[in-house]
Image (cartoon, rainbow, N blue to C red):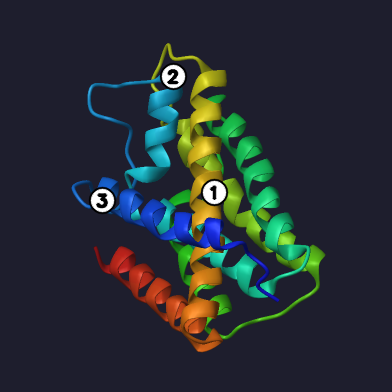
Amino acid sequence: MMNFSPRISRFALPLVAVLTAMVLPGSLHAHPLPGGHGGFLGGASHPLLGLDHILAMIAVGIWAGQAGGKARWYLPLSFVAVMLVGGLLGATGVTIPMVEPGIIGSVLVLGVLIAAAVRMPLPAAMAIVGLMALFHGHAHGAEMPAGTSGVLYGCGFLLSTALLHLAGIGMTAVMARVARPVAVRLAGVAVIAGAAVLIVW
């Protein structure tokens, strides 16, 4: 089921290490770069400066890789597409209730889905990740610095999100080949633990 080239697998782990190194000095919840940087750099940095976004976006990739088939690419694409809608809503001042709880809840739910190796029809899985993406996208858009280019900012956080999804897919491929499928489920447990940290922080 995990038909990934060795090149992708070798690329995934260094990418995860770099992303982790970027987030460790920051807070657990995402914030824009200090000094109000906007544009592409500000958008690209936003998903990488909070454990909440990193865990959720990597977890989407892990769940997609775990499901395999069309879900491997449709789930990340659904997340990115709906996140763009959420970003537009946030940037234009449209209010969505329970954004922060929704973000943390998405981490918890994804962890449970991975740990339990939940399989469901593709449209239902896409709807779930789409709902999660709405909260994440709204947070990105709402925290866009004033006067910045919305197009560049949006391209930035969309690219970072896509890379985090790819990291999760690559991690799943590595875990399935080097270890066993149970390692992927244990990654879900780790995501649940991360959600617990976010809840009590």
Give the percent coordinates (x, y) of residue 52: 39, 56
Give the percent coordinates (x, y) of residue 54: 41, 54
Front-most of residues 102 and 77: 77
**Image depth: mark 3 or mark 1 in front:** 3
Q: Which mark is residue 164?
A: none
Give the percent coordinates (x, y) of residue 14: 37, 55
As measured in the structure, the alpha-carbon distance from the residue carrying label 2 to the one carrying label 3 is 22 Å
**Image depth: mark 2 or mark 3 in front:** 3
For the N terminus, which image quadrant? bottom right
Q: Extreme left residue here?
A: 25
Residue holding disc 2: 39
Front-most of residues 93 and 39: 39
Going 57% across and 34% down the picture, which residue do you hit?
Answer: 87
Q: Secondary structure at mark 3?
A: helix
Please indicate whether residue 187 sits to the left or right of residue 61 in the image. left
Q: Is residue 46 above or below residue 91?
A: below
Q: Earlier in the sequence, mark 2 or mark 3?
A: 3
**Quadrant of residue 80 within the rendered picture:** top right
Give the percent coordinates (x, y) of residue 198: 32, 63
For the C terminus, which image quadrant? bottom left
The type of residue carrying mark 3 is Ala
Q: Secondary structure at mark 2?
A: helix
Residue holding disc 3: 21
The type of residue carrying mark 2 is Gly
Q: Earlier in the sequence, mark 2 or mark 1?
A: 2
Using a 10 Å C-alpha cutoff, classify the residue at mark 2 as few (fewer than 14 neighbours), some (14 to 19) or many (20 or more): many
Could you tell me if residue 102 is visible in this image?
Answer: no
Residue holding disc 1: 135
Could you tell me if residue 120 is visible in this image?
Answer: yes
- Are circles 3 and 1 on residues that touch, CB within 8 Å? no
